[in-house]
Image (cartoon, rainbow, N blue to C red):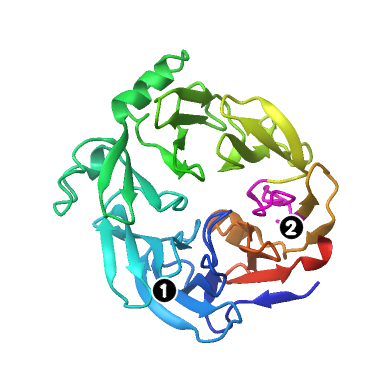
Amino acid sequence: MDITKISEGAYSTLLGMNGGMVESPDGTKIVYARKKNLDEKETEIWICGRDLKEHRYIYTVNCMNHNGPSATFLNNSEIVFRDNKNGLPMFHIMNIDTMAIRHSITAKESHCGENGKYPFSVSKEFLNQNPNYPEINECGIYILDLATDKISLAVSEREIVRMVENVGLTATEHVGEVSHVQLNPSATSVMMRLGVPECRVFGALGCIDLDTHRAHIIPDKPVHQLWYDDDTYMATRQFYNNGIIEMETSYIARFSKDGREIEVLGGISNHMDGNKARTMFAGDHCYPGCPTDIGLYKKGIKEPVAVFEIPHFEEIVWDKKVHPNPSFSRDGKRLYYNRPCSNDRTEAVFVDISEFY
């Protein structure tokens, strides 16, 4: 199986989160990051064609290596990516045709946009940090409407606290500091990772339906969750035994909003993704002491149809936090991922998986 590098040079290249929108919706462009030194924060955002021609510098941000700058397409002309200002995370939304920054907001970025909307979260440290956005005036989850530029509070911190307490979990003063915020495809529900004392290993997964504000929680959640469809998740089921998280017993599955396992989707995994048709799934072997190879699975079968090997470099994976983060292309014919080639350098690559359908 041929591995194709997105860009080659005296630098590392990085892709964002698992399941990120590496390609534009029309499938003509790719967004990725370049970094001269993985021990430094300076990171460049680049765009190129799907044919790997016309590489173009976009912007420079400050971020470390975990998920890179989380760069992802929102539509054919706009991308979103994270940055850091005065020690606080922020994100930019930029038009790659005009090179104009449409929004710069000091807040915690989300996984991606859905249905023309982009969610983000605000906790206490972000209050009073957005003078150009007076509507960001309390803690919670906000939604930016990309068509109108309107920002609205979708879920307040008070609502998050009630959701946690109503199922008997402890809402600490930090429970509103949610992460991995993601809208379902129709943007009618929003999920979030919650930190609660009772779920120290995996955390809890919360979801609120935005029309009724019905709340759902999965304690000790499956990991690296993504929406499968409007009403269910796909994620990796992991098991914690004798002080370690096991690799061999992990698998990709589909779950209801309240945590019921609906069906098995694939085998060994940590970071995972599924193609748009939800017929193929991919998961990496990102566990300490193991090569971070990626398995490709047909729906419902734990045995992989292919394994894409990744050289085993512990330092870059765990100390520098470069994880494979597999992501399918829009048409499902490519699988994108991060592939370390030494303890100091990594490459953003893809493989053509058309033959496995």
Q: Position of residue 79 (x, y in %)?
A: 41, 65
Up/down of 107 relative to 47, above or below: above
Q: Residue at x 19, y 49 (%)?
A: 129
The amino acid type of the residue labelled 2 equals Asp
> Can I make out residue 75 in this image?
yes
> Can I make out residue 36 in this image?
no
Task: Give the residue number, with chain letter if any, for mark 2.
Answer: 293
Q: Quadrant of the C terminus?
A: bottom right
Up/down of 19 relative to 156, above or below: below
For disc 2, the neighbor class at 10 Å (few under 14, some 14 to 19, many from 20) is some
Give how far apart the Cα atoms at labels 1 and 2 are: 27 Å
Instruction: Tell me, for residue 263, which label it has, or none.
Output: none
The amino acid type of the residue labelled 1 equals Glu
Contact between marks 1 and 2 (CB within 8 A): the answer is no
Q: Which residues are magenta?
A: 270-295
Instruction: Tell me, for residue 44, which label it has, or none.
Output: 1
Up/down of 50 relative to 357, above or below: below
Q: Mark 1: which secondary structure?
A: strand
**Front-lying residue, 54 or 106:** 54
Q: Mark 2: which secondary structure?
A: loop
115 part of magenta stretch: no
